[in-house]
Image (cartoon, grey):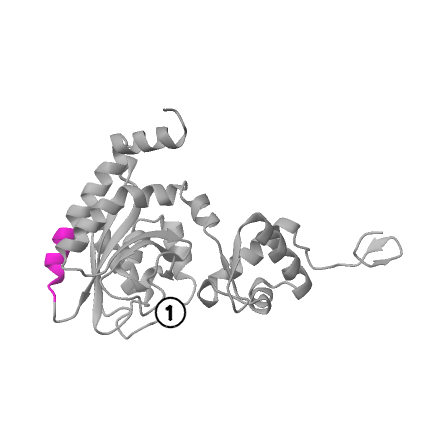
Amino acid sequence: MSEAETVGDAPAPTAPQRTAAGRMLSLIGAFEYGGGVLTLSELSRHGGLSLTTTHRLVRELMEWGGLEVDHRGRYRLSRKFVQLTSSTDAMHLREIALPHLMKLHRQVGGSTVHLAVRDGRNIMYLDALRSYPNYTGESRIGGNLPLHATAAGLVLLANSTEDEIREYMQEPLQRFTPHTIVDPDELTQTLEMIRAQRHFVYPRSIVLDAGGVATPITGLGGAVRASVNVVWFIDQQDPQTLLGYARAATAAISRALVGGRQAPDARTVDFNRRRAGLF
């Protein structure tokens, strides 16, 4: 007999059961919460799993090497996930962009520089260069913010399809400050302007004392792959000056992307050959 209760020969309707893989993915997804450091009960709650199932999956992940546990019994994802993600397309993009982002960071006097891609209704930061600690938590590497609330996000949304934009506007848009664009008509006009000028300057959208300047990174065929954002403080910096530097950086990154993967440095080749025992 199956796990579903039956009445006669007809099975009673039950909620869809998650597969073993689905339960494991739910557990891994739970690390999005709590700053990525969670107790067993928190993993159970955020993953929507029973404590028994959570304990079993945690043990399996520990044996695989995917989790670390601290002296307080809290779990975090291990470095193994960094190794796995290092070969993804997103990390390849970050690797190509990083030298140009570092140069931009110096040119703008240490202002925060972000590399962002679209992640559903949000942006996800692939990199964040700053001269001070991250005090918001959302602008960290891997952090997310709604597309409409950031300059980088609006640049990405503006280069989406009409259906994607229409679908995005169907849900209520969160307002962070009085300056966050949440009105559909205003948002439509803003996206049209971004497509025409290929950049966006967005003051006070998340906090009242700062704004963002964003420009797109394009790949083959001119498709927008990502965006670069520079944070500036109101009344302390000129966003138009920052815009010039941001445009130069995204143009350089776009050229590198279209040109393909750069040839490795000879020292890198030598190191890899020695590590492999080839000489």
Question: Would residue 271 appear left or right of 55 to someone viewing this image?
Answer: left
* Residue situated in front as seen by the camera: 258 or 30: 30
Q: Which secondary structure type mostly characterizes the magenta part of the structure?
A: helix
Can residue 128 be spotted in the picture? Answer: yes
Can residue 262 be spotted in the picture? no
Image-based side of 241 in relation to 76, left or right = left
* Residue 6 picture quarter: bottom right
- Nearer-the-camera pick, 86 or 117: 86
Residue 259: x and y, percent? 25, 32
Q: Which residues are magenta?
A: 237-245
| Residue found farthest to the top | 279
Quadrant for the C terminus, please: top left
Task: Name the residue: 69% across, 59% down.
Answer: 15
Q: Is residue 162 magenta?
A: no
Q: Which residue is mark 1?
A: 174
Q: Residue furthest right?
A: 8
Q: Is residue 239 magenta?
A: yes
Residue shown at the point (14%, 52%) measured from the top left: 245
Q: Three-letter amino acid code at disc 1?
A: Gln
**x, y percentage for residue 116?**
31, 53
Q: Is residue 187 depicted above or below 258 in this figure? A: below
Q: Residues within 10 Å of mark 1 (few under 14, many from 20)?
A: few
What kind of element bears circle 1? loop
Q: At which x and y percent is residue 173?
A: 38, 67
